[in-house]
Amino acid sequence: CKPSCQSGRTASVTALTCENGVLSPATFQCNKNCPAPTGRTDLQNPACSDGDTIEHGKKCMVVCSGGKVAVPPTLECNDGTLESLSGLVCQAPSGAQCSQPSGIVNVATQACRENPIA
């Protein structure tokens, strides 16, 4: 038997089997799926590479905007909640170079001698 849950939920098992009148497993849960993060300008839309919805127990591969990388790179869906979402940041990739600072009073032609700044 293939378990069936209401829309927006995922079964905790993929199949139930019956052998000699004994159902295995005897029961299952219907866990909430997670919506991809929204409302953040530092994230693409959708913010997860697999789309707008992440099934319970699956991971969202976070997609930042502007070529930045997500830390952590994945968020796991646990019964309707994306774990580690509150700590998610999008930052420049490792080894990225910085631009010259601007708006400094009485600076030389360039604020730093190196261009670009490593």
Image (cartoon, rainbow, N blue to C red):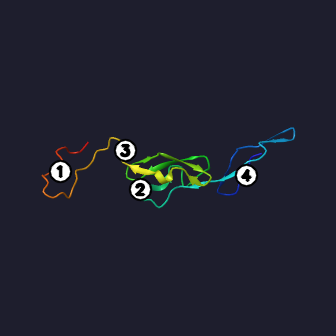
Q: Give the secondary structure at mark 2.
A: loop
> What's under tag 4, amino acid-wise?
Ser
Left or right of 56: which side holds 44? left
- Residue with the mark numbered 1: 111
Q: Position of residue 59 (x, y in %)?
A: 55, 46
Nearer the observer, 47 or 79: 79
Q: Position of residue 74 (x, y in %)?
A: 50, 46
- Residue with the mark numbered 3: 93
Q: CA distance from mark 4 to mark 2?
A: 36 Å
Label whose residue precedes the other's in the sequence (2 or 3): 2
Q: Give the secondary structure at mark 4.
A: loop
Give above or below for 103 relative to 93: below
Q: CA distance from mark 4 to mark 3?
A: 42 Å
Q: CA distance from mark 2 to mark 1?
A: 28 Å
Nearer the observer, 102 or 65: 102
Answer whether labels 2 and 1 touch (C-beta < 8 Å). no
Label whose residue precedes the other's in the sequence (4 or 2): 4
Q: CA distance from mark 1 to mark 4?
A: 63 Å
Q: Residue at x 44, y 46 (%)?
A: 71
Label whose residue precedes the other's in the sequence (1 or 3): 3
Q: CA distance from mark 2 to mark 3?
A: 14 Å
Answer whether labels 4 and 3 touch (C-beta < 8 Å). no
Left or right of 19: which side holds 103? left
Label whose residue precedes the other's in the sequence (4 or 3): 4
- Residue with the mark numbered 4: 4
Q: Quadrant of residue 18?
A: top right
Q: CA distance from mark 1 to mark 3?
A: 23 Å
- Residue with the mark numbered 2: 42
Left or right of 75: which side holds 93? left
